[in-house]
Image (tube, grey):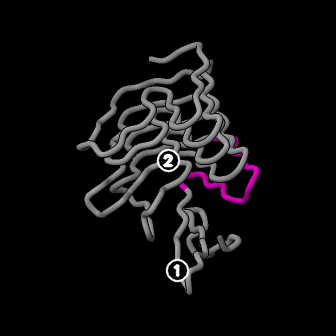
Amino acid sequence: VVRDCLIQGWNNVGGYAGALTNAKLCAYENIYVAEDVTIIANNQAAGGIIGSGDNVAVTNCAVGANITAFTNAGGIIGEVRLWNEEITAQVNNCYYKGRVTALGDYAGGVIGKVLDAGMVRLTDKNLNNVLVAADMRSGGESISLWANSPLRFLRKGRSKFFVRTTTELSTSRRASPR
């Protein structure tokens, strides 16, 4: 149980863990982050349980904290790095109720942003029994009740980003080329 505190840092700030990368599957179970907790990443990746991670499983957890980051703010996980098919992220039997704010871009009720995943399909295998009651705010356009995932297409040295979320299965929004 995490209660009555401010958790703040520059990058990868979580209510329970900051950054979890290059590890075997890290499982987090039965964690409660209370409503009187505030989590802030001054730059990127703030999450109710984990700031940033790959190969993570979050099960039987509840978060009521208010979460803020410049980019990649998520109710359960700020950002997930899925570099290849062997790396997974799972959120099962979890609940988020609070406010998620991305001052720049990528606010998600469950996951703020899924990085380098190609076409991400959120299914019962990686999101199961998840309840989200969130006040979502973003300075940019990328807000999703579940997760934001940019898909990069390379053409003649330029990248274009298309954003697809589970709440917009049949539509895509095109962001400016970078």
Q: Residue furthest right?
A: 139
Which is more toward the observer, 137 or 157? 157
Q: Quadrant of residue 35?
A: top right
Residue located at (29% from left, 36% from top): 27
Where 10 falls versus 111 (above or below)? above
Left or right of 175, for residue 8: left
Residue at mark 1: 154
Left or right of 12, for residue 162: right
Q: Residue furthest bottom?
A: 156
Residue at mark 2: 79
Residue located at (54% from left, 15% from top): 3
Locate the N terminus by quadrant: top left
- Taking the magenta stretch, the answer to whether it contains residue 131 is no
As measured in the structure, the alpha-carbon distance from the residue carrying label 2 to the one carrying label 1 is: 23 Å
Which segment did they paint magenta? 134-147
* Disc 2 residue type (three-letter): Glu
Q: Residue furthest top?
A: 4
Residue 66, position in %: x, y?
64, 30
Which is more toward the observer, 102 or 90? 102
Residue located at (52% from left, 43% from top): 78
Where 63 falls versus 173 (above or below)? above
Closest to the camera, between mark 2 and mark 1, is 1
Bin the neighbour count of mark 1 within 10 Å (Cα to Cα): few under 14, some 14-19, many 20 and up. Answer: few
